[in-house]
Image (tube, rainbow, N blue to C red):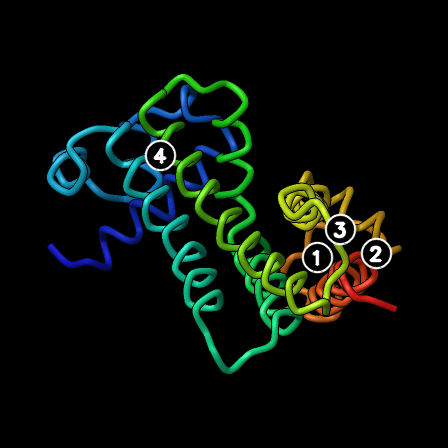
Amino acid sequence: MSTDKKELIMKTAISLFSEKGYEGTSIRDLAQKADVNIAMINYYFGSKEKLFEAIVEEKVQHIRGRIENLENDKNLSEIEKIDLIIEAYVDRFLSYPDFHKVMEQEMLVSHRKDMHQKVIEVVTQNISNFTKIIEKGIRKKVFKKVDAPLLFASIVGTIHEVLKSKQICCVYIFKESNKDFNPYADEQFRKRLVTHIQQMAHSTLLQS
């Protein structure tokens, strides 16, 4: 059994969870949509819950590692680190919009407490590393004294807002919505979103 099949199962699961919800998606639905048998899903993951955990683990660990690496990078200024964190979040969220919609639903209902706690731990670590960068900039008198966790929430919240639906996203970019246009894959919009959030962060952080 190839890892290609494993990745296909995970990708298909994200799509179905986004469309029908976690509770509304059965292993049978997943097997049919991915064109694999149920035994293969059980071989790789054991259960639907374990499959969901594997998806979350893979996606959230990537961004955590990125922020940790930036926080420890001695060659970048604090504002360069913030800019790169913003780029990383926009790229990650817009590259996997279905996953982030699923996670938003999951965090609202919180049926799976172990997984909910795992996500909270990762988010907490991300905020901690982000805050360390901000605090270092404040000590250097490059940054104003700001509420770092709420600035982090403002950055992520802006991205979440455009992920609510493709139709709403099209309203923000003044483009008529149609089934053939995917705003999340539009490079112009990505660049515009990154630039806007960076400008917001610069305005909040940098001494005049």
Q: Residue at x 11, y 54 (%)?
A: 1
Find numbered disc 3 in the image and state the secondary structure of the residue it sits on. Answer: loop
Pointer 3 or 4: first along the chain: 4
Which residue was labeled with disc 1? 183
Residue 173, numbered label? 2
C-alpha separation, residue under disc 2 versus residue under disc 3: 13 Å
Q: Amino acid at mark 3?
A: Asn
The one nearer the camera, 23 or 62, is: 62
Q: Quadrant of the C terminus?
A: bottom right
Find numbered disc 1 in the image and state the secondary structure of the residue it sits on. Answer: helix
Foreground: disc 2 or disc 4: 4
C-alpha separation, residue under disc 3 versus residue under disc 1: 10 Å
Q: Residues within 10 Å of mark 2 (few under 14, many from 20)?
A: some
Q: Please tell me whether residue 74 is drawn above or below residue 120 in the rendered image.
A: below
Which residue was labeled with disc 4? 118
Side (left or right) of 143 relative to 173 = left
Foreground: disc 2 or disc 3: 2
The percent coordinates of residue 84 (x first, y second) are 59, 69
Q: Residue at x 80, y 58 (%)?
A: 200
Which residue was labeled with disc 3? 178
Asked whether the beta carbons under mark 1 and mark 4 sit within 8 Å of each other, the answer is: no
Q: Amino acid at mark 2?
A: Ile
